[in-house]
Amino acid sequence: MYSDRINALPPYLFAAIDEARDELIAKGVDVIDLGVGDPDLPTHPHIVEAMRKAVCDTKTHQYPSYAGMPEFRKAAADWCRKYKGIELDPATEVLSLIGSKEAVAHIPLAFVNPGDVVLYTEPGYPVYKIGTLFAGGEPYPLPLTAENNFLPDLDSIPANILKKAKLFFFNYPNNPTAATADMKFFEKVVEFCKKHDIIAVHDNAYCQMTYEGYEAPSFLAAKGARDIGMELYSHSKTYNMTGWRLGFAVGNSALIKGLGKVKSNVDSGVFDAIQIAGIAALCSSQAGVEETNKIYEERRNTLIEGLTAMGLEVKPPKATFYIWAPVPEGFTSMSFAKLLLEEAGIIATPGVGFGEAGEGYIRFALTKPVGRIKEAVERIKKLQL
């Protein structure tokens, strides 16, 4: 019944986790879900109010612009200038997105021909690989290891792969490892991509989820990055707007135009009322973002303290709301996730679900209050690992 491309896809990781959670809840299990990275905190009230007013305005009820409202694109450009130090032309270098996930899926359709290679960091967001497969491309993972600070070794890529490489997806602050990258690394990516004629796509969805004064840089701030690259931003994590589906792509005008051509043929743009709410998020005080980060920082510290007390070596991340922890000796990532689920009622994501390079690790999302995280720690302690 299904097409070959659908039959070739692995089960989508987070859909499988949701299914397992729902089955346990149906059995009456008190589940602590630290699996999917979906903020439990509500969208900031002033954003909701902006949406409420906009949705009552009949002018928003018609088809939106494919590229996004000019006001939204200007707000995105202004935000990038203020918080990331990059200058953008809202008309040609900014594109609204129905969440950054759809951009990740659509970008290969714009630039990849069957047989072209797409490089991506692994462990990583599953859609880098899935979007490549949909476009008929060949995904080529670049393993992230603790020994290399979870940065890819660009010098290790074989020459025959580089000859066919067309795209490179990378993501810092990183999901799932929570690793960060500095401008030196971004400059190396620019040099690498220019040398091999590769399009660089930086997924910057977690750039505002930072702690202890850390500021995550923009890839486009690296010299020459605008010549070969684009960057994806999301309202989902920064403003607790996962369900709203809103983000934006910025960068090289020809690349933005290519992605826009795909989108104009497969979707009808972002609902104007949501874009108006997005403008409120971008243009108003960011105090709510800072407060949210303080909450995640407390949760981070609580979970790391508990895991460390059990003998698991975990470094406090400077960004994201994920803890990337090595599994105890004698376990695989799947077997440990299974033990947590079946014996402790805790959902965590096995590292191998993000690719083979994720084996040996498990990801906890800081999406529950401190009290529930403490309870999760106590449940794990009782397993006597």
Image: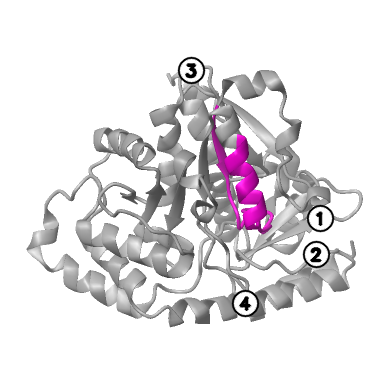
In the rendering, at what x and y percent does residue 230 appear? Answer: 45, 45
Q: Amino acid at mark 1?
A: Pro
Q: Which residue is mark 4?
A: 213
**Disc number lying in front (3 or 2):** 3
Q: Amino acid at mark 2?
A: Val
Determine which of the numbered discs, if any, sits on residue 326 in the image: 1
Determine which of the numbered discs, if any, sits on residue 114 in the image: 3
Span colored in magenta = 166-192
Residue 83 seen in the figure:
yes
Circles 2 and 1, Cβ within 8 Å, touching? The answer is yes
Residue sitting at x 24%, y 65%: 276
In the rendering, at what x and y percent does residue 75 appear? Answer: 30, 64
Circles 3 and 2, Cβ within 8 Å, touching? The answer is no
* Dot 4 alpha-carbon crowd within 10 angstroms: few under 14, some 14 to 19, many 20 or more: few
Q: Please, what secondary structure does the residue beneath circle 2 have?
A: loop
Q: Earlier in the sequence, mark 1 or mark 4?
A: 4
210 is higher (above) or lower (below) than 69: below
